[in-house]
Amino acid sequence: MEVVSVYNDKGGVGKTTMSLEIAAAMALSGKRVLLVDNDPQGSLSMSCVTDIKSVKDGMDRVYKGEVALTDVICDTYIENLFIVPSGLKLKDYYIRKDVATRDRVGEIIDFMKTDADFVNLFDIVVFDNPPAQDGIALFCTMQADKIVLPVIPDDMCFDALVRTYAFIKEQAPNFLDKLIVIVPSLVKNRGVHKRYLKAIKSEYDGKNDNTIVSETRVGDRAEIPESIGLKQILFISHAASEAAHQFKNLCLDIFPWIEKDSFMQVLTNAAEEKKRGIREKFKKMVEERRKLAALNINEKTAEVVNG
């Protein structure tokens, strides 16, 4: 079982979108995946949980020790993909870097990796973290097996990447054992993108055997409107798009054990199956409209005849 942390101490770089897309792709490929919404904003939870109004408990109460992790796992719209929602009081752990919080996060991740029932239930856990250099975001990232660092190639975000990477290197135990994937998003000005990509590669490629700079180009600011809500996941709604293709490639970077051809084919099949379902639903709707229209015509004819 692998634990992946999507992290950057700067907001607006596409962490939630990236967490959602890579988790959905792996679930569609047949892996059982658990998303953990560590962000107090709860955007991921609101997008993914099938019945968000019925959710009473989340990660806030798990961190507090009031409920068990396995008791707050919710279904999503995609088979094999589950989520632990954030919870109303998660903000209490947003910036706390006390020993108790660190130890509690450690207990939860240790449970994920060692509990026999949990390990049998899930193959991958993906943490979507808030933008912070402390609190739960830092502690989860320190103890994850793999760290994904999305970054928009501009001055502020480049500085944030340098700061975030250095901070993780300083804080994380067994830093050299972790796979770190840096994902520079594609900006509209390709010249600017190439310049920053070159700078990022120069800074990080080859300096740590387990750090790679991905060639993935996930779109301007990594904000893909179609990915908001699993009903519109890219691999289904826009399967042939460049964005979907790039997120598939990102999965290959993060999970190098994936067999590329079968992975790509499985996602293609999932998209085709979804399209068939949409077409059948549309045909059924058309038939119902036709029947309704015929019924209305018959009623109006009867009115005319009966004067």
Image: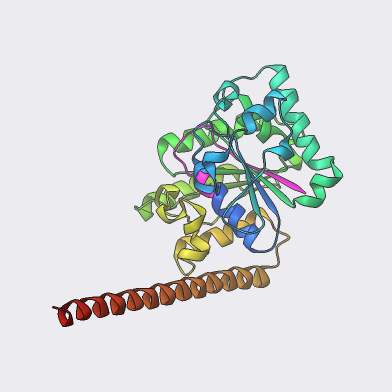
Q: Hey, which quadrant is residue 103 in on the image?
A: top right
Could you tell me which quadrant the C terminus lies in? bottom left
Q: Residue at x 42, y 51 (%)?
A: 193
Q: Residue at x 63, y 56 (%)?
A: 253
Image vertical order of residue 46 relative to residue 293, above or below: above
Question: 224 and 118: which one is in front?
Answer: 118
Image vertical order of residue 299 relative to residue 127, above or below: below
Colouring chosen for the image of the structure: rainbow
State whether residue 201 appears in this view.
Answer: no
Q: Which residues are magenta?
A: 1-18
Residue 70 location (% of width, % of height): 73, 40
Q: Residue at x 25, y 76 (%)?
A: 299
Residue 47 location (% of width, % of height): 50, 46
State whether residue 240 appears in this view.
Answer: yes
Image vertical order of residue 98 relative to residue 225, above or below: above
Q: Hey, which quadrant is residue 294 in on the image?
A: bottom left
Residue at the farthest left position: 307
